[in-house]
Amino acid sequence: MKETTEKIVVVGTGPMAAEYVKILKHLKREIRVIGRGSESAMKFNETTGEKVITGGIDLWLRNNTPATRTAIVAVTENELGKVTLSLLKAGFTKILVEKPGGATYKEIYEVAKETKKRKARVFVAYNRRFNASTEKTKEIIKKDGKVLSFNFEFTEWSHVIGDLKKAPGVKENWFLHNSSHVIDLAFFLGGVPKKITSYCAGGLSWHPSASIFAGAGVAENGALFSYQANWQAPGRWGVEVLTPKHRLILRPLEHLCVQEIGSVAINNMEIDNTLDTQFKPGLYNQVEAFLYNKKANLCPIEEQSHNLSFYKKIQNRPTA
């Protein structure tokens, strides 16, 4: 059946898909939501007011020839790569897929390869790049002239995560699926690594590769960086960027605190975060950038594929 009205295809009926639909409706864009089960579809309809076509993306693609070639993939972690590959092979040329872009390192590489083959554009949804706090940090870095050094922490709360019910393999790849949010932001703001040395220790029943992480390196822009995380101890996500004039502290990532040179005071920076309070932080500007080709902050799948080499070193997964 040939569609005549172009719509943004949203694949998924979970909380993230609902957040995307909320923004798309605010932007007055036409939407078509594809899900699997009837129960989740009913809940999604109650939450968003949008009807859901059930049966899954592969069934829908077999029975339809979409007029649109634009999609947002917000399915469960273990389905991200599979759904994106199905869309690419069906002729979709512009896709925003929830981080990290696939269930495993291997799957992300496959998505990147298929994207290149199809001459498509696939972007990984690292919405923290679009936080108001991130934008203000970038503005100050630009004004100050350069990044001298930066550090970050990606501690996860293992006492909470261990009890979560997830599909097989998801928690084993929690570093990639969740911690990469922080690491992507740190390298986005501070600079992409040129050299990196990593150390790991420990391990958890659900994340055996490691649970304690530390390391340091040099970014391509010359900035030195360090990181640490301990999933067996208290902690939280955070990024700090140091310029010739300021220490810029994102802890939590949605807030910016600033220490000026010559002062020990750490002050909260006032920023306009209206969109980050009305919608999920960073998501509105990310969707706008995706829809209207504002590529500056977006993470192309090619960039993500390149960055996986750093993620593997940090996670102690050299062959993953």
Image: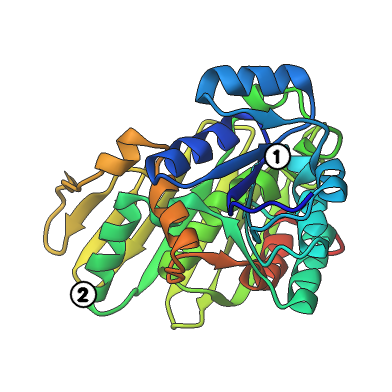
Task: Estimate the x, y position of residue 93 in percent, counting from the top left.
Answer: 67, 67
Task: Estimate the x, y position of residue 156 in percent, counting from the top left.
Answer: 59, 37
Q: Is residue 112 above or below residue 258?
A: below
For the C terminus, the image quarter is bottom right
Q: Which one is in front, 189 or 201?
A: 189
Q: What residue is shown with label 2?
A: 144
- Quadrant of the rendered image containing residue 296: bottom left
Residue, x 55% and y 65% (percent of image)? 299
Can residue 131 be seen in this snapshot? Answer: yes
- Tell me the kind of residue under disc 1: Val
Q: Is residue 262 shown left or right of residue 138?
A: left
Residue, x 31% and y 35% (percent of image)? 277
Q: What residue is shown with label 1?
A: 75
Crowding at mark 1 (Cα within 10 Å: few <14, some 14-19, many 20+): many
Q: Nearer the viewer, mark 1 or mark 2?
A: 1
Crowding at mark 2 (Cα within 10 Å: few <14, some 14-19, many 20+): some
- Tell me the kind of residue under disc 2: Asp
Q: Earlier in the sequence, mark 1 or mark 2?
A: 1
Q: Which one is in front, 292 or 110?
A: 292
Residue, x 27% and y 48% (percent of image)? 256
Can residue 252 be seen in this snapshot? Answer: no
